[in-house]
Amino acid sequence: MTTPEAEPTSPETPEEPARPEEGARPDGAARPEERLEKAVRAAEQALIEYEIAVETFRVEVENFSRLHHQKLGPMYARLDELDALIAEAVAARSGDPEDLRKADEARARVLPMPDVEELFHGWMDGDGLFPEAAAMLTDQTVRPPQRVRPSDEVRKLYRELVRKAHPDLAQDDKERERRDEFITRVNAAYGRGDEASLRELLAEWEAGPVPEELRPTPSEELYARLEWLARRKELLTVVAQDLEESAIGSMLKLAPDDPDRFLEEIAEQLLAQVAEREAELERVTA
């Protein structure tokens, strides 16, 4: 197959030189932000992998907790009940104040097994992370805003801001985007009944948009992204630490390769203890 010959270039119209790629320097050197961009991409990937590891461990702990409750919960409850019955039988026979005190303490220990959320210090329940914990990890508001009744002054400020900054007053797409973002903040402050924030927003709007030269540079934005990634990693580390230090997490770490067998061993020990307590109860009540 032959390729078509290139059309001759007229001397009067010299061939236009190729344009450099957007963002590239004329001399071919790397842009100043290139190393930062690589660092951000690497940090983002590392955070994703860490999130996967934390979530995987969370699911393992939750599953182990369910098995623990199903298999061992009734045995622990039976042991507590037998201890209370034995102490009460001893106290009834002796009438000693110290024995009576011990019987009361033993009866007070007869409580149901803690729920999953108790074991995990409020980070999550059987359905996963609590909304507050999930919000912390995604840099959102930790608690949903409470219902408030805005004051007359708050309503006045809100109406003034909406009249001035409504997106429908924009002359172009860029301006509309700016107004949309601003009105979102106004609505959030109004929803909280936050008069101080509304006054600050009013002053911000009246001052006008931030001049281009005062906006963050690409390097500054990349540094800010790195800082955010580091903060999120710290929050995930707290979650992972709480999981590891919880009662169930600590047990799971003792037998990470075969947790089911570990539970079976504990169950066997508990069954032996139950048999011993039942024999003792029979002896003290005979």
Image (tube, rainbow, N blue to C red):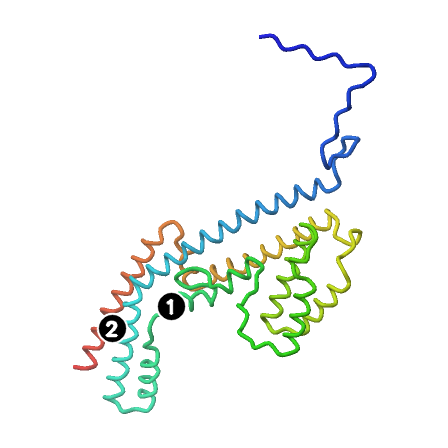
Relative to 105, is 262 above or below? above
Give the mark toward the camera: 2 or 1. Answer: 1
Q: Which residue occupies the foreground of this view, 226 or 284? A: 226
Residue 120, horizontal then vertical, whole percent: 45, 65
Q: Secondary structure at mark 2?
A: helix
Give left or right: position of 12 versus 38: right
Q: CA distance from mark 2 to mark 1?
A: 26 Å
For the residue pair 50 and 148, the one nearer the viewer reads as 148
The residue positioned 26% from the left and 84% from the top of the image is 88
Which quadrant: the C terminus? bottom left
Residue 71 in percent (x, y) is at: 29, 61
Q: Nearer the viewer, residue 261 or 38?
A: 38
Q: Residue at x 80, y 19 (%)?
A: 14
- The residue under the point 57% across, 8% down is 1
Whole-percent x, y for residue 171 in the image: 70, 53
Disc number placed over residue 217 in the picture, else none: none
At horizontal 63% and vertical 55% (from top left) the residue drawn is: 228
Residue carrying label 1: 115
285 relative to 52 in the view: left or right = left
Which of the pair 220/47 is nearer the observer? Answer: 220
Residue 13 placement (x, y as % from top left): 80, 19
Please give the residue where the numbered disc 2 appears in the rendered image.
277
Disc 2 marks a residue whose amino acid type is Arg
Residue farthest along the right direction in this orientation: 12
Q: Quadrant of residue 68?
A: bottom left
Identified by mark 1, the residue type is: Asp
